[in-house]
Amino acid sequence: MGVGGAGVEGAGGGAGAGGLGGRGGPGKADGGAGFGPAGDDAPDPFAGRFNGAKTGTGRPGTIDRGAAGWATAEPRRPKPRRRPRQRKNEKLKTTEAPGLVREEWRANNSIAYPAGRHCERTAIPLGLHTMVPHLRHVVVATHGHCFDGLASAVLFTKLYLTIGASSATTFSYRACDYGPDKNELAESTWQGDENALLDYRYAPSPRLTWYFDHHETAFATPEARLFYDNNASIQGAYDAAYPSCTQLIFDHAVQRYGISLPELDELISWANLIDTAAFSDPEAAVRRDSPVLHLMTVMEHQGNSALLQTLVPRLLAEPLQALASSHDIVQRYQPLAEKRRRAVAQMQTKLTTAGCVAVCDLADEPTEVVEKFTPYMVFPDSVYAVIVFRTHRKIKVSVGYNPWSHQPRRHNIGAICMRYGGGGHPVVGAFTFPVAQLPEARSIAAHVIDELQRDAPEDSAGG
């Protein structure tokens, strides 16, 4: 069998380039690899171009055919046509498929490289994607197990697509979690042509090209802040005054690029409400009646990279309420609802008070679900709450301010938690320990409880 050449003009174009040998049939004219029948009757693609004649390069040359019929001297092949440059913000062929995630098609050994609602889905054979100059891969690392982290990934992806992503852009999503020895992101995280970090502690890497965050404790060291301030090439925004990272990305899109995203207004509103705990009362926060709060619960407990990879493209294509009420989210939430019910009952028996602080220690055994608003429901006059609990992987100390207490907050909780390797906002924060360090975790939690009972000014908490 002789090998035919690959067509250089694509579907509907002219004839493909000639085959490599004189015994095979010509290549397909539609750009596919052709396999012609072997035999002496097959046309010779190089006939008349050798044996004393001028070659395509303008130099005389001869061809010496071996027994197998293969050429030992190969003529210069025609240059492939250049792919036309795509203009910025140019809409490609419109399709309804949102398709933002790389999909492996094992059946036909190819990878799909879709680019969004306004771009045509394309398929490129495995192994060829490294040779396509317009193919770009974007790594989006965001706060995992967090509704604001999910919503931020959606807003950023929409922003990136709108400002001119090509039809060969792919996205992968990574959930970043805080924990013992997990706060620093490895340099191997940044494998994309563009790398974005959202709603998470800053990673001082030269490969990071986008950064959005609203945590007061975003920079672990002064050196990290200096690296960020001196990095003129990084895009994005940091502002600790924002209610959510989602809102920050939206405002940046509007102010910097003049983009309007009305289809994501509901997602932004819910991100603000959830991240600021702006519920009407603690009972509403504990009940979680809305399907969106069911989605929030699913994200809190199952929001790993795989779930982000599934939900981000769906939220770009489906209304928030429709996705939150979908069968798969309902199926994920139902067992969590029962665990939450049991967790609330358990916490009601464990809760005590120390002055203005509600205290709950659940660390005697692993706990899968903790309802952090329960202390404010049981002790509505408490100003703060400290909860100590453990999972199979870590000990966590959660600290919060009761927004329904009608008492002034005099401590910066994020700054307190940062002293112990954690972080957060002025109104809520947490820090973690390895499971083996439970006594140390309890000792530090007791110190925090004592500090919160003191009537100290807010800015003294960070000292």
Image: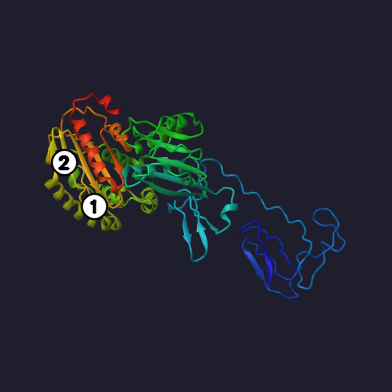
Q: Secondary structure at mark 1?
A: loop
Q: Could you tell me if the residues under marks 1 and 2 are in contact, i.e. CB atoms within 8 Å? A: no
User: Of the residues shown, which amino acid type is indicated by label 1?
Assistant: Pro
Residue 200 percent across, percent down from the top left: 37, 39
Q: Residues within 10 Å of mark 2 (few under 14, many from 20)?
A: many
Foreground residue, 331 or 56? 331
Residue 385 percent across, percent down from the top left: 19, 37
Residue 116, can we see it?
no
Q: In the rendered image of this protein, does residue 403 appear above or below residue 396?
A: above
Q: Residues within 10 Å of mark 1 (few under 14, many from 20)?
A: some
Residue 97 image-quadrant placement? bottom left
Q: In the rendered image of this protein, does residue 403 appear above or below residue 294?
A: above
Quadrant (top left, top right, bottom left, bottom right) of the C terminus: top left
User: Of the residues shown, which amino acid type is indicated by label 2?
Assistant: Pro
Q: Earlier in the sequence, mark 1 or mark 2?
A: 1
Residue 157 percent across, percent down from the top left: 43, 44
* Residue position for label 1: 366
* Residue position for label 2: 375
Q: Secondary structure at mark 2?
A: helix
Foreground residue, 57 or 130? 130
Furthest residue toward right: 52
Q: In the rendered image of this protein, does residue 248 appear above or below residue 193?
A: above
Relative horizontal placement of residue 85, taking residue 276 as reference (left or right): right
Distance from Cα at disc 1 to Cα at disc 2:
19 Å
Residue 416 percent across, percent down from the top left: 28, 32
Residue 358, can we see it?
yes
Quadrant (top left, top right, bottom left, bottom right) of the N terminus: bottom right
Foreground disc of the pair 1, 2: 1
